[in-house]
Image: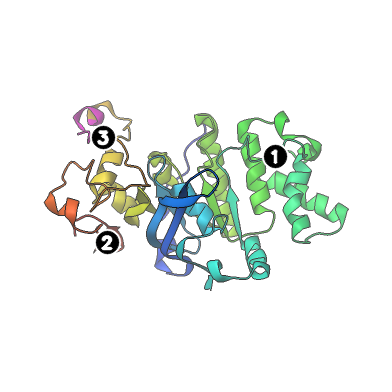
Amino acid sequence: MAALPAQKSRQSASGSRDIILRVKNLKKHFPISSGFIIQRQVGAVRAVDDISFDVYRGETLGLVGESGCGKSTTGRTILQLYKPTAGSVEFEGKDLATLPPAEMRKMRKQMQIIFQDPFASLNPRMTVGSIVSEPLQIHSMYTGKNERQEFVEALLQKVGLNPYFINRYPHEFSGGQRQRIGIARALALNPSFIVCDEPISALDVSIQAQVVNLLEQLQDELGLTYLFIAHDLSMVRHICDRVAVMYLGKIVELGPTEDVYENPLHPYTQALLSAVPVPDPTVEEKRQRIIIRGDLPSPANPPPGCNFNTRCPVEFELCHHDPDPPLVEVLPGHWAACHRVT
């Protein structure tokens, strides 16, 4: 198994305070309709429900939480693959939600995505060369065929693939190799910001570290900024400068990675981290597990008050009746949304 990447310095990315992406009060609700002939909206799935955060240039911001909490929807709404229900997404000072189509098309060159499933995200009828060069054709870059082929071969080599693979098809590659093809496609337009939507969750453990090492290497070489969506909290700790924890469409904690892992403030974050195994039998035996009771409520019908009150081990009366607690800066740079800590 390849070694995990060395832990990164947490100060450089946030110290400059150069904001590349600003998300303000972002909402994405999917309508629920009823009726066969005449349909009417009877509700909405609140996949992303009023979240705000900044991403600093050159950093990796981790977005974690259990399945169904809205992580992937957040990433796709930021890229305008889903149109937001409300709120704004400012990239390089421009609100993407209000840009006309022609301007948005230009902005897409600077923002790309690496999808979760390397088996479903590549067209099986296209060769590797066609897959990687397609963005170049769409945006009229490297119009000469030979010039474009040379660029694609160099790009494949950069992500650790043999440039002679250019005429092969996706089914001829392993999962790790397919994900490298997806990374090459995302890099083709020389973006500055990439949404990594669980890029390692579908891969073998032995391959995960290799892909993470590659992402870190590319970030150092190209000055990339990542929104890294993941389930693996151990990997998030190694690659991310800051981490945001989501629960039922909302961000419940946000802060520098080491601060969140060493001093989690929100009960949900504490429960998540208590489930992360420690490679020391003595420490593992003495650790206290925090068991989250019950099931995740439906995002179409969240509980009144705090979203987490139905499963929280430290809830009290205020949590059931008071409006959802806002995200408050409890410690410098460390935010939490909980009545117990605010």
Along the viewing direction, whichever of 31 and 85 lies nearer the viewer: 31
Q: Is residue 10 visible?
A: no
**Residue position for label 3:** 294
Instruction: Decide whether residue 289 is among the magenta residues.
Output: yes
The label shown at residue 326 is 2
- Residue numbers of the magenta segment: 283-292
Instruction: Decide whether residue 306 is among the magenta residues.
Output: no
Q: Main secondary structure of the magenta part?
A: loop
* Above or below, 19 relative to 267: below
Give how far across and how far down residue 146 sits, in percent.
87, 52
Whole-number angstrom distance, CA of label 2 to CA of label 3: 24 Å
Q: Is residue 37 visible?
A: yes
* Above or below, 284 relative to 214: above
The label shown at residue 161 is 1
Tag 2–tag 3 contact (CB < 8 Å) = no
Residue 255's quadrant in the figure?
bottom left
* Above or below, 319 relative to 1: below
Counting residues from the N terminus, which is met first, the one under dot 1 or under dot 3? 1
Give how far across and how far down residue 136 sits, in percent.
75, 56
Q: Nearer the viewer, mark 1 or mark 2?
A: 2
Whole-number angstrom distance, CA of label 1 to CA of label 2: 46 Å
Counting residues from the N terminus, which is met first, the one under dot 2 or under dot 3? 3
Along the viewing direction, whichever of 148 and 251 lies nearer the viewer: 251
Residue found farthest to the front: 37
